[in-house]
Image: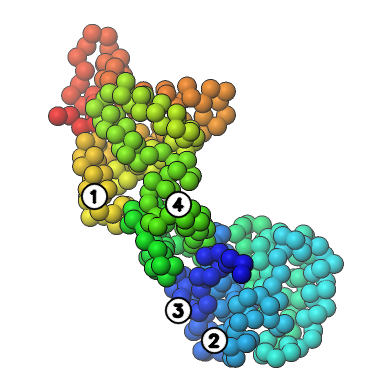
Amino acid sequence: MSYTVLARRYRSTSFDELVGQEAIARTLMGAIEQGRVAHAYLFIGARGVGKTSTARIFAKALNGGSPEVDKAIMTGQDTDVIEIDAASHNKVEEARDLIANSIYRPLRGKYKIYIIDEVHMLSTPAFNALLKTMEEPPEHVKFILCTTESQKVPATIQSRCQRYDFRNIPASLIAEHLTNVIKEEGMKAEPDLIHLVARMGAGSMRDALSLLDRLMAAGEKKLTVELLENLLGLPDRQVISSLIDALADGDAKTALELTDQLLARGVAIDLFIESLTGALRDLMVLAACGPETMLVDIAGDARKRAFEQSRRFDAAGLVHMIALCENAHRSSKYSSMPRAVLDALIARLAMAEKLADVAALLASGAGAPAPASASRGSPRKKA
């Protein structure tokens, strides 16, 4: 039998199963209960946040009833719920065919429902043809338009739709869902691994599940952070942690040696900087909000370790360090010597306090004593 990926097998099939979009689910259910279903809807949001799943669930609530019909709708095979990928069906002739067929009543459901995915990919003539039907749609026709780029959908189309903005799914909710999936699959995973995969999903449940699928394909009995790092070529978190300790100590030599160690293992420079920036961001939030904050998706001993590190820095200094990392990340992409950019970044982060003292000395005049506030912007706290 062919394998079905996790993102499809664990796709939401009811409003109750939608993760992170509860407000939208309640509104759509309320519209059905009150008989206030509009003729056109526009679902906007990043990839993998549930737009198409919600469209199918909504269509099932409007047209479903029997297990056979419900299954056909949820798999995109129902005769009355027509799914169209605008990326590959964006010509005006195809839009006109859709309009011509819309006059025919549904075969077994109450409505003929058109779900148009990535609707922003339609050509201008196709949008114009679609607009004509949306202005005066037959009473048995409903449109559900989905897009990741709302700015490319003409205002004339948007004004005829009820708009719903899908938010990125919080990492905590993604982690909870991944935990359930791992349990259903009869596997085990480190808690830190689950939180890391959830964060790497960047608000997309589909991306997180796809990454989990890749980990499971490795055939290991237990999913670990080390497995993820090896699979994606990510920097070792322990080495990143040691690197941050070196930065806190102002030890540029050790920091540069640890950087070289990670690059020697095949870690890409952009991934290195991204990982360092993410770690510094966590420290900044912990320094500003305390160890119990929910704004950091770190669990167990890793959270304790991160909080202890955060106490070695000033929150304002960490903000500056993050800005330096972001600038270096951009510069390294266009530099002919990205390694030099990275090494300069690490040296600057390690010597930030000395550089701040020199800047204060220059600002106050040669030979004049530095003011007491000279190192206020220093990333590290004074002993």
Distance from the alpha carbon under mark 3 to that under mark 1: 34 Å
Q: Residues within 10 Å of mark 1 (few under 14, many from 20)?
A: few
Distance from the alpha carbon under mark 1 to that under mark 2: 47 Å
Q: Is residue 65 visible?
A: yes
Q: Residue at x 70, y 91 (%)?
A: 108
Mark 3 or 2: the one toward you: 3
Q: Residues within 10 Å of mark 4 (few under 14, many from 20)?
A: some
Q: Amino acid at mark 3?
A: Asp
Position above or below: 293 against 361: below
Q: Residue at x 45, y 28 (%)?
A: 264
Q: Quadrant of the C terminus?
A: top left
Q: Secondary structure at mark 4?
A: helix
Distance from the alpha carbon under mark 3 to that under mark 2: 15 Å
Q: Which label is found at residue 16?
A: 3
Q: Amino acid at mark 4?
A: Met
Mark 4 or 2: the one toward you: 4
Percent x, y of residue 71:
60, 82
Q: Residues within 10 Å of mark 2 (few under 14, many from 20)?
A: some
Q: Which label is found at residue 301?
A: 1
Q: Which residue is mark 2?
A: 32
Q: Amino acid at mark 1?
A: Asp
